[in-house]
Each structure stands twice: as C-alpha cells, then as structure tokens.
Image: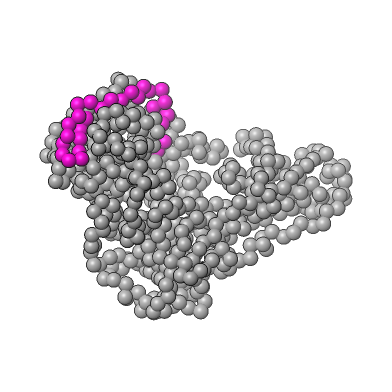
C-alpha cells in the first residue's frame, strides 16, 4: 500500500488524471498515518505521502540513511541521484521553508562558455541580452523543465505557476564570467558574482500572474555582499500583454528564447504567462560588494515577522497574505526606507502547557507570575521561533494558535492577565545524567577467560570506554540551554545570562577528549558492555541577545535574529547517554551505544568528539565509530 501511494503520487502529479481519481487518492493518503522513516535536516521524513507528510522535497539520496535509502523514489530520470522525501509542513521553520535542490552534477561535463550579446537598454537600470552558449549547454538548460522537481511554493496564494529552487555553482560561475565581460559599467562596479541559488519558474497559458512585487535582495553581512540587480533567463519564448512589466520602466510583450533580462531590484514588477505556450525562466541576482550599509532595526523586525507568518500560515492560511505584504515592504524598504504599514496587524495567542503568550515573530509577550522566569520565557520563545521538536511533535503543533488582528499592542497586558501563566519548562541539573563510574578493579583479561567472576562495572577497559562515551554525550548536552527528555522540556538556567535588559543565550563551547586501549576474545569487546541509558534531545542556539522590558505586568521580549552582522545558527539533535551493563550484549545487536549514536553528531568534525578536558578530537573514539560502520552497518 505504501509503495502504491509513493508511485501513484508521481503518476498523478502530471496533472492529467481525472478529478475523481485524484480525490480517491487523496482520501487514501488522508487515511494513512504511519511513522516517519528517518530524519534529515531536522525534519522527520517519510518515503511515501501520509496524512501528515504531504509536502514533497528533493534531496541528494546519499544524505539519507543507507538502511532505508532504497525505499525513496527517484522520480527524475535526468537526475537519478535525487530522492523524493515527504515532510510534515507543520515542522517547517525559516531554516527549512525552501527546498534548495543540488544540481551541480547536471552541469559537470557540460561546456558552459556563455556570452551575453546584443545588449539593449530597456530603461534606466534595466537591460536585455541574448545568451549565446554551446548546444550542449542549451540542451541541458532546456531539460531543467523536465526534471519533475516542481513543488508548490509557500506563497502560492499570491502567485501563479510552479517553481523549484536549485543550487549550481558551475552555472553561476559561467554567468558571472559572462556578466563581467559584457555588462555596462554601472553593473560591473563592485560586482562580485551571480548568486548560485536559482529559481526555475514555469507558467502555462491561463495561469495566474505572478503579482506585482519587489524581489527580496540577497544579503550577507559577514562578506558585505548585497544583490542589486535581478537576472532572468528565459528558456522559452513567447508573447503576453506584457510578459514582464517593470513599473515605471519597460514592458516586454515579446520574448525570444534565451533572452537574459537584468534589472535594478528597485523596480516593482509583474510577470504574466505567455499566451501561446509554456513560459519557463530562471531567476537569480547579481551580488555586489557593498562596504557601507545603514541599518534600520524596524526593517529587520518586519522581516522576522514575515518569516514567522510564513511558518504560521501552515496552521492559519489567512496569515500568508500578511507574510507576503511584509516581504514586499521589506524589499522596498532596502532601497527607499520603510513606509508606513497598515494600522491593524496580526498576532497569535498561544498556550504551551499552561503558559499563555502572544507573539508576532519579533515580539513575544508573557504575563509576569511568581512561577514564570525570564529564562523560561526566553526558552519558550526560542522553541516557538525555531519550531523545535519535542518528542515526536513540532512545537507549534502543541500550542493551538489563535489568530488575532488588532490595532497596536495596548490590549495585550490585560489579555494575558486574564490567562494566568504557569511554569511549563522546569530547570534541570544535567550532571545527574552522568553518574561517576565505579572504582576500577581488574577481574581478568577478558570475560571469556574469567567467566562468572567478570564484573563489567569495574573493568578498567570498559570504564575507560564508558568515560569516553560520557564525554562524547556531555560535549553535546552540557552546553545546551534547552534539553528534551521524551516529551519533557527542561532548561539549564545557567545558560540564560541576564544583563540589564538583555538575555544572552549561551550555546556550545569548544570541548575535548580522552584516550583508549585493548585481550577481548569471543566478541566480548568493551563496546558490547556500553548501552544507552537515556536519549536526550538538545537544542543549541547561536543567537543575538534577546531584549526584554517589564511593563504592565508583562515580560515583553524582542528577537532581532536578522540584524546587522548577526548570523543565526540552530541545531537540534538526539544525544544518547551511555551506561555500563553487567551482561554482554548479544550478537544480534552489537555495540549498542555506538550503534545508537546520531551519525550527524559523529560526523561533525568541529564538535563531534569534544570533551571538557582538552581541545583535541578523540581519534580513537572516532575509529570505533568507523570500525562499527565498516563491520556491522551493512548487515541490516
């Protein structure tokens, strides 16, 4: 049944199936609620659609666990290395909204000598070119439409057509060289490169327009990069009235295949489908080095709200229009300053295990009580903003959001006072997860030779490995400000430092390791005596300070994750706490703790094997992981 659901999804996605057949299929999917197959990028993924896992994404198959990889469909004949996975859209956060497909492999053996010729100035800051390229490169670009990678965008309510997003450094490098040779002086001054992230858009005659909008500029504060021009490459030609309309500039009614249009991102613009055939085009942007920026914190606040409403629109579709409006306001503000918005704006009232709060993605309000600490408020806001997983559920699915549209914020204190908040995130002493080992007492060279007298809890080699395994787990658990034990959410108050009106969330430190040594006969290796005592979910955050104010009986927290030079990182993982068991594990499940360790932690060379005593990677523990993968992983 699951295989049929998987295969019929792609058979029906062509859009040619009768409506009753599609309705019957959707009913079957809605009646299917199986557990996810594995996780990837923090998302639970399934190899077939279910009532929860309905959003399809395309990923490099090599990134999926080898034991289940073959279950996932490879729907693109042109890119067989891509696997289709299905995710629960309710788990998405701003880090995972978009599915950026790696497509460099498509261009590896393709000659990409591009030339931009026949330049035409369409208007001030807007140009068109003909893209001249080898026949093989032209054929490769034309086949992008046939990859079957289109997915509905999250802003599908405000635009027509379909699109997918892909990354290709090779394609970007070829276009960068072409722009550097052919662009007029105003485009070359400060020009760095073409953004390697491309949108492939497809419109059929009769589709809705992509409504009038500004493109959101690319911005990298660390490298002082910003995009100033949009690049459109039309893979098909056609006519419309007009096909591209730059407000206050040019309007193109006829477009030839492989026309390249470059225009200043200050232009508001709109695109219409061709009247006489399929419209397919690529979008990227020209990125420039810009050493001097001014910053308006209100723009960053509005962008935070836009991202937040995008995620919340999964639960309340009416919020999508607010997100779209905010994105467009932000894109305009980058060039013209922030204009006044509508007086009424959306908020969500949420309740998490007795704690009521109101949020808009930048501001979070909590009622002050004797039981609710500032650290707890900050923890809940972080869990909400990043939509972290708690047990098997995404945080936002546990909150029952209520959308409220209001003028201003004066209503919030009284609203929350009527809904007194209790404590929902208890403190934890994480050292209790790591009891000290027993005193060592050698009981012979190995269990094979000592039989009944062997005591695994006192054997020096087992305890040496136990200590090393503890260090591995401690390296990921001890620095975490928030941990999850099953469905219990616990915080470490010491990781929330309050200074003045700011809350600093302390994250991972550089931590470090120990050493190792070995007569272990009959398969009775130390690894077979180290089992999993507990599985702890950890959430690490590298975020700017959180501002807070106390007024009218409320804590008012403000998060500006996108401001100035701040770069945001968030990682959530499960860490297995080791324990020594008295009996050796049977051969059917060898090396239980080693087998259970999350391989994303074990493969991260920057943080995988750190412990508190030194700043070196525990190479011998790394070798144990590698040995297990070589000896046992293929057996499942």
Q: Residue at x 50, y 56 (%)?
A: 541
Q: Give whichever of 491, 146 is nearer the camera.
A: 491
Q: Which segment is the magenta one?
A: 101-129
- Quadrant that contains the C terminus: top right
- Quadrant that contains the N terminus: top left
Q: Residue at x 25, y 37 (%)?
A: 186
In the rendered structure, does residue 112 fall within the stretch colored magenta?
yes
Residue 553, image x and y in percent?
41, 79
Q: Residue at x 33, y 29 (%)?
A: 177
Figure disc tally: 0
* Quarter occupied by residue 527: top right
Q: Is residue 583 above or below residue 141?
A: below
Q: Give whichever of 14, 301 is nearer the camera.
A: 301
Say if residue 75 shows up in the picture: no
Residue 245, image x and y in percent?
16, 42
In the rendered structure, does residue 117 fall within the stretch colored magenta?
yes
């Amino acid at each position: 049944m699951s295989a049929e659901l998987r295969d019929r999804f792609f058979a029906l996605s062509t859009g040619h199936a009768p409506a009753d057949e599609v309705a019957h299929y959707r009913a079957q999917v809605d009646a299917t609620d199986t557990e996810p197959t594995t996780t990837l990028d923090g998302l639970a993924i399934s190899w077939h659609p279910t009532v929860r896992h309905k959003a399809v994404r395309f990923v490099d198959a090599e990134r999926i666990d080898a034991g289940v990889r073959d279950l996932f469909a490879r729907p693109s004949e042109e890119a067989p290395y891509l696997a289709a996975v299905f995710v629960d859209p309710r788990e998405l956060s701003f880090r995972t909204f978009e599915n950026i497909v790696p497509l460099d492999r498509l261009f590896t053996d393709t000659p990409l000598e591009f030339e931009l010729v026949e330049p035409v100035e369409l208007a001030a800051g807007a140009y068109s070119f003909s893209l001249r390229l080898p026949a093989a490169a032209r054929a490769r670009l034309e086949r992008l439409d046939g990859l079957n990678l289109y997915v509905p965008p999250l802003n599908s309510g405000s635009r027509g057509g379909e699109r997918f997003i892909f990354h290709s450094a090779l394609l970007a490098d070829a276009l960068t060289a072409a722009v550097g040779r052919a662009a007029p002086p105003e485009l070359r001054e400060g020009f760095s490169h073409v953004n390697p992230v491309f949108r492939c858009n497809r419109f059929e005659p009769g589709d809705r327009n992509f409504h009038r909008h500004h493109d959101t500029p690319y911005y990298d504060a660390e490298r002082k990069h910003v995009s100033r021009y949009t690049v459109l490459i039309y893979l098909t030609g056609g006519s419309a009235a007009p096909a591209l309309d730059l407000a206050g500039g040019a309007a193109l009614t006829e477009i030839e295949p492989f026309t390249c249009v470059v225009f200043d991102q200050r232009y508001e613009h709109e695109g219409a489908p061709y009247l006489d055939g399929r419209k397919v085009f690529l979008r990227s942007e020209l990125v420039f080095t810009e050493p001097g920026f001014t910053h308006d914190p209100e723009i960053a606040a509005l962008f935070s709200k836009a991202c937040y409403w995008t995620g919340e629109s999964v639960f309340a579709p009416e919020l999508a229009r607010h997100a779209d409006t905010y994105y467009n306001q932000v894109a305009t503000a980058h060039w013209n300053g922030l204009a006044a918005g509508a007086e009424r704006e959306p908020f969500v009232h949420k309740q998490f295990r007795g704690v009521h709060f109101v949020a808009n993605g930048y501001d979070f309000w909590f009622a002050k009580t004797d039981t609710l600490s500032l650290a707890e408020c900050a923890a809940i806001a972080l869990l909400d903003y990043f939509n972290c997983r708690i047990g098997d559920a995404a945080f936002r699915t546990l909150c029952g959001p209520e959308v409220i549209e209001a003028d201003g914020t004066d209503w919030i204190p009284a609203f929350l006072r009527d809904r007194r908040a209790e404590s929902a995130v208890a403190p934890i002493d994480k050292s209790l997860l790591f009891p000290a080992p027993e005193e060592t007492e050698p009981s012979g060279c190995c269990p094979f030779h000592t039989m009944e007298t062997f005591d695994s809890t006192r054997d020096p080699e087992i305890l040496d490995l136990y200590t090393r395994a503890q260090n591995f787990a401690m390296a990921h658990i001890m620095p975490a400000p928030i941990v999850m034990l099953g469905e219990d959410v616990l915080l470490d108050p010491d990781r929330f430092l309050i200074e003045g009106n700011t809350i600093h969330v302390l994250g991972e430190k550089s931590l470090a390791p120990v050493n190792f040594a070995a007569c272990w006969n009959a398969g009775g290796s130390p690894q077979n005596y180290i089992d999993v005592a507990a599985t702890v979910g950890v959430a690490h955050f590298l975020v700017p300070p959180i501002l807070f104010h106390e007024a009218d009986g409320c804590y008012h927290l403000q998060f500006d994750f996108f401001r100035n030079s701040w770069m945001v990182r968030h990682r959530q993982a499960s860490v297995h706490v080791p324990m020594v068991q008295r009996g050796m594990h049977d051969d059917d499940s060898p090396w239980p703790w080693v087998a259970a360790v999350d391989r994303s932690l074990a493969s991260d060379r920057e943080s995988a094997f750190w412990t508190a005593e030194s700043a070196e990677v525990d190479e011998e523990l790394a070798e144990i992981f590698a040995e297990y993968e070589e000896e046992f992983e293929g057996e499942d």
